[in-house]
Amino acid sequence: MITAQDLTKRYGDRTVVSDLSFTVRPGTVTGFLGPNGAGKSTTMRMILGLDAPTRGRATVGDRAYAAHPAPLTEVGALLEARSVHPGRTARHHLRALALTHGIPKSRVEHVLGLTGLTEVADRRVKGFSLGMGQRLGIAAALLGDPAAVILDEPVNGLDPEGVLWIRTLLKSLAAEGRTVLVSSHLMSETALTADHLVVIGRGRLLADTTVTDFVRHSGAGTVKVVTPDAAGLVRHLTAPGVTVTTDASGGLTVHGTDAEHIGRTAAAHGIPLFELTPNTASLEEAFMDLTHDAVEYPAAREGAAA
């Protein structure tokens, strides 16, 4: 289990992470999401003891990462796949890591095979593609057969087959009872892989929930309504945060409230409904809706003055 408790990190007068608390539990894949500059990488570095928190603490298992006598067997991490000496081969890089923990050579060969690198194991890393570098970083993360895994953008540079492989791998690690924390900008892939989400923005916690509940309770969903009294229904639905648009056939698309509220409102005023269909938001839509005020460099709206 990975626990962050009141984590805060300041650089001078700039607060990068602020009072951040969450728990990553065994047996699930937890997606760690946030816009660029949200503090995800800093948080992962604090969990791994690479950055000292200004306040608060992070633990893996029951202690700080640095306090584990054999940390590679407790948590495997991929933060920067290319942080490898370019003159080393993949096999030598992994064997060097293995020697620090007394890990046998057979385990090195196992993770080389697991990550599809056996045939290129004796090539120097400087000749690796981005995808091959990612696979080597994941092999290093799995080398100690750890109870917890932390991966930052693991599908970066992978082809479709590699993305599917990562998805299957993460699910299998969670199924074995391991703790899995994965940071990603690919919402579609996170929706297929993660069971739980921790979402942050500007260093603060925005959501800590299941993927299903996150999408269900998002304000990004819409409801399609067909009624012979569209004007009357719109009048009664008018409220802050609720928007209604009309399509070419006269149907309504309502944003900002749910189907239950619309149905109850229509019933209370005797307005018949021919159709009431919720359109659930995608994970990407739900994420954008939650984090739109936390984007570090928001794009200019279409049509805005230069």
Image (tube, grey):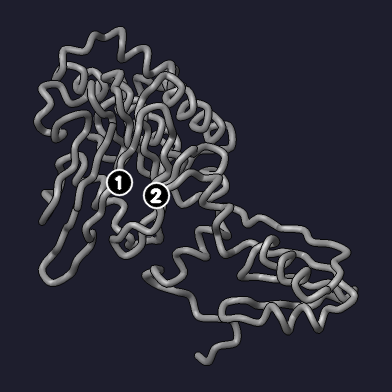
Secondary structure beneath disc 1? strand
Seen in the picture, residue 252 relative to 77 is either above or below; the reply is below
Residue at point 80%, 82% (across, down): 232
Residue at point 32%, 62% (across, down): 37
At label 1, which amino acid type do we have?
Phe
At label 2, which amino acid type do we have?
Asp
Work out whether residue 22 or residue 88 is closer to the camera in this orientation and state it.
Answer: 22
Can you tell which quarter of the image residue 221 is in?
bottom right
Give the Cα distance between marks 2 and 1: 7 Å
Work out whether residue 12 or residue 305 is closer to the camera in this orientation and state it.
Answer: 12
Q: Earlier in the sequence, mark 2 or mark 1?
A: 1
Can you tell which quarter of the image residue 149 is in?
top left
Work out whether residue 240 or residue 29 is closer to the camera in this orientation and state it.
Answer: 240
Residue with the mark numbered 2:
208
Which quadrant would the N terminus be assigned to in this image? top left
Kindly check if marks 2 and 1 are in contact, taking CB atoms under 8 A apart as contact.
yes
Residue with the mark numbered 1:
22
